[in-house]
Image: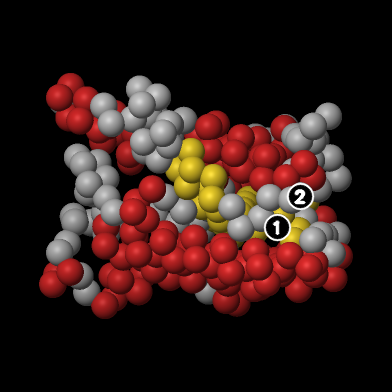
Amino acid sequence: MAGALTDRHAIVTGAAQGLGLAIARTLAEAGARVALSDVQEEKAHAAARGLPGPSGRHLAIRADVTSSDQVAAMADAARRAFGRVDILVNNAGGSGTLPVADIEETSEELWDRIVDTNLKGAFLCCRALVPAMKAQRYGRIVNLSSVAARGSFGPLLTVGARLPYCAAKAGVQGLTYQLARDLGPWNITVNVVVPGFTLTEPGARVHGQFAELTESERRLLVGPIPAGRPGQPADIAWAVRFLTSDESGYVSGATLEVSGAA
């Protein structure tokens, strides 16, 4: 079947909930065994148990992607459990819940924390997995960026550490383009998915904030989207699934924006 991931083994970071969990579920439904990495260990274990397949097919690993030691341990744990890792999805990231700060008010500590989570984390995960992918001469790496890399505004998109977040997500795209060129000779593809405004599951921060908006604020946010609606986790997950499949083998260094044409 086109897009099938039978006998493939994946790591998805930030996979305990939200987009990461939707991606993990979609890869599992396509036949992959999935290691769900997250700092929320209990949620990751519950998420792994909820994926399709027999008990023990999927794996939960606690890892902070900003720690090189924890990322190395995550990669080792997945390889021990699966024998190999074919797919890496760098989804972990975020901008936090702090109010937007102008550059004069952005501390170095805040800058480092957001850039480390969104950009350094992707770098560390790639560095940990690429040597084995080179040895097996196969790999699919998908990084998650954001339309915020172009700049951010609006009643929801101004929440969080906007300046370092936008800079980090732009950096993720640069990381993708260079790695794609570097790793092409080893049959390793590297691509970036760029979600637009996306509502995750009820109870998540952005979903709750959207529900609290006035009707005029919702129109302001959704109105510029030609598709007429916010994105759903499945929209992003299916884009990732394509880029992890054998059918996407000649697609590398590509930006796949999933934004409803916004």
Q: Nearer the viewer, residue 87 or 62?
A: 87
- Which residue is pictured at 39% across the width and 64% down the height? 168
Disc 1 crowd rating (10 Å Cα; few below 14, some 14-19, many 20+) is many
Q: Which residue is mark 2?
A: 249
- The percent coordinates of residue 69 (x first, y second) are 60, 77
Q: Identify whether 22 is placed above or below 153.
A: above
Classify residue 209 by image quadrant: top left
Left or right: 53, with 231 as reference point? right
Q: Nearer the viewer, residue 169 or 81?
A: 169
Left or right: 40, with 165 as reference point? right
Classify residue 134 by image quadrant: bottom right
Classify residue 106 by image quadrant: bottom left
Give me the C-alpha separation between circle 1 and circle 2: 7 Å
Tag 2 or tag 1, which sits nearer the N-term? 1
Left or right: 72, with 79 as reference point? left
- The percent coordinates of residue 171 (x first, y second) are 44, 66
Q: How many marks?
A: 2
Q: Are marks 1 and 2 in contact (CB under 8 Å)?
A: yes
- Which residue is pictured at 76% across the width and 35% down the height? 3
Q: Which residue is mark 1?
A: 189
Q: Identify whether 208 is placed above or below 67.
A: above
- The percent coordinates of residue 232 (x first, y second) are 46, 30
- Which residue is pictured at 19% across the width and 56% down the height? 100
Q: Name the residue type under label 1.
A: Thr
Q: Nearer the viewer, residue 251 or 18?
A: 251
Q: Secondary structure at mark 1?
A: strand
Q: Identify whether 60 is placed above or below 154.
A: below
